[in-house]
Image (tube, helix red, strand yellow):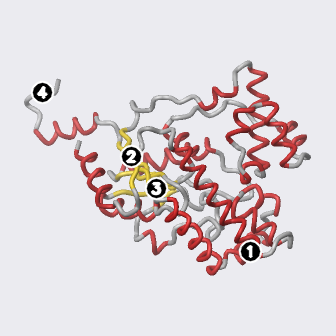
Amino acid sequence: MVSASIAPQRVMSYVAAMKKPRMLIIVGPTASGKSALAVHLARRFKGEVISADSRQVYKGLTIGTGKISKREMKGIPHHLLDAASPKRRFSAGEYARRARRALDMIYHINKLPIVVGGTGFYIDALVGRIVLPDVPPDKKLRAQLGKKSAQQLFTLLKEQDPKRAKSMDTPSERNNEVRLIRAIEIAQGDHLSGQPGDMIYHITCESERYHILWIGVRPEDAELKRSINARLKQRMRAGMVDEAKRVHKAGLSYKRMRELGLEYRSLALLLQNKISEKEMVRELESDIWRYARKQIGYWKRNEDIRWFTPAQKTNIERVVRKWLEK
């Protein structure tokens, strides 16, 4: 019990200190307007943004990933953009560690952290909704698997972990050799330890650590398709192909570009003269739409998310304000 002799201001500080730290999380498919909404809310509620995007985390991959520009940030600090070299994989575990450091810094200056992105695995790792596998890298196994094609790796994964293979059964994932090798590595590590692979995706309770408000942004399908296609055309005009040439010249291999998936996979094929620019755009329109549908499917499992259309900005503000006042 707090002594009655303590000044009211100190009582309020004591109560505030006992509250769980708040975290606003904005999720949704690519091209849904999440980044613009995060900036708007950060300006309204004194926040800073932590990006949760598995490719925007890499330096130099700007146009191809649709990374927010300095002008679009409108002075709001953004964390975990351009944070790593694209030549090496940035894991969900590493993301969670660095994002938590950013959270601590934002809390220290009494700002509201706003986590925004479409990489569900990153966000779930950050807040503890999934348990990351405790399987260390196996250099010998990786060297052996590195000699196999993506198709051979996916076939092997289906044999060793059918559930994980089913979750990766998309064109982008089936061609991501790094993720396929890691999935096989985990499957074999779990087999040796006697733990089932699906234990990796066990959901935990994180409510004791953070007070989280989940906001989902989901346009209607027709609107989302138009946004995806318009955004792709805009990036092509902005020099997406030239950017791919620059990062390749700077040392990013075509193999690594293919592993990064989506735009960079198609750009690698274009630069190797395996497809035409027209074929690349047509392929990307289809692949990005499938990826957006996959993102929506991922978030459907989270019943805490409150979904809105991009036009419901006023409603979203009202919900956030009410949450902050609790």
Q: Quadrant of residue 14?
A: top left
Between disc 1 and disc 2, the foreground one is 2
Nearer-N-terminus badge (3/4): 4
Q: Amino acid at mark 1?
A: Arg
Residue 64 relative to residue 218: left or right:
right
Position of residue 86 measured from the top left corner of the image (x, y, whole percent): 70, 59
Secondary structure of residue under mark 3: loop
**Label 1 – label 2 distance at C-alpha:** 41 Å
Q: Quadrant of residue 42?
A: bottom left
The structure residue drawn at horizontal position 41% and vertical position 39%, both measured from the top left corner, is: 304
Name the residue carrying label 2: 306
Name the residue carrying label 1: 246
The structure residue drawn at horizontal position 30% and vertical position 51%, both measured from the top left corner, is: 320
**Label 3 – label 4 distance at C-alpha:** 49 Å
Name the residue carrying label 4: 3
Q: Identify the image quadrant of the N terminus.
A: top left
Name the residue carrying label 3: 218
Q: Say few, some or many: other residues with alpha carbon within 10 Å of mark 3 (under 14 / 14 to 19 / 20 or more).
A: many
Nearer-N-terminus badge (3/2): 3
Position of residue 155 measured from the top left corner of the image (x, y, whole percent): 84, 39
In the image shown, does 257 or 308 lie closer to the viewer? 308
CB-based contact (under 8 Å), mark 4 and mark 1: no
Nearer-N-terminus badge (4/1): 4
Q: Amino acid at mark 2?
A: Arg
